[in-house]
Image (tube, rainbow, N blue to C red):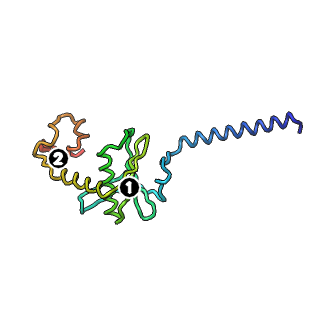
Amino acid sequence: MNEVTLFYVFTGLFLLLVILLVILKIIEKHQEPEMENQDLVPDGEISSIILRSEKYGLVGKPDLLLKKGSEHFPIEVKSAFAKERPYLSHILQLAAYCLLIKEAYGVRPPYGIIRYKNKDFKIAYTKELERSLLTQIKTMRSSDPEENDLPPVCDDMRKCRRCGYAYICHTGQKRLF
């Protein structure tokens, strides 16, 4: 082969390699995103399951339950973008899942993860966080719906469907949505 032919062969191979790399990049962009912190990626993934605790009177279903060895970790996925810190309500929700995991599997999860659109937060499940959760649960249970803690009666069914109080609405009607 002469030099001109070799030039065209190598140029063609180079262009083919570039095209393959571009195709691989496109495929990679369309795959599921991985967690940002690789140290958080556990051995196995369990589809979300309903967890129950008779002791605490709680039921919950984390978005994702991950397993690493004998430990389980909840991941709560939010559709919003993260601020500087996760919302307290999101932290308490994650803590409730940790409490349910401790009851279900007998092993206290050291942390859970709140995943927002733009970042993840690794939240340590400390004794202090557990106490805060239990205090919040006790406060919520001691609240008397008759003390007008409920929002005003509303005749707009669109609002009622999204209302967290619909099941105990003080209109006296039992509503199931």
The residue labelled by disc 2 is 168
Amino acid type of the residue that numbered disc 1 sits on in the rendered structure: Tyr
Residue 143: percent from the left, percent from the top?
15, 49
Q: Locate the N terminus by quadrant.
A: top right
Q: Quadrant of residue 97?
A: bottom left
**Element marked by disc 2:** helix
The crowding category of the residue bearing disc 2, from other C-alpha atoms within 10 Å (few below 14, some 14 to 19, many at least 20), is few
Q: Which mark is residue 36?
A: none
Q: Is residue 76 above or below residue 104?
A: above
Residue 76 is left or right of residue 151, and the answer is right
Residue lying at 50% horizontally and 45% vertically, measured from the top left: 33
Residue lying at 23% horizontally and 36% vertically, measured from the top left: 159
First in sequence: mark 1 or mark 2? 1
Q: Which mark is residue 111?
A: 1
Q: Point out the residue furthest to the right here.
A: 2
Amino acid type of the residue that numbered disc 2 sits on in the rendered structure: Ile
Q: Point out the residue furthest to the front here.
A: 128
Residue lying at 34% horizontally and 60% vertically, measured from the top left: 101
Q: Locate the C terminus by quadrant.
A: top left
Residue 29: percent from the left, percent from the top?
55, 40
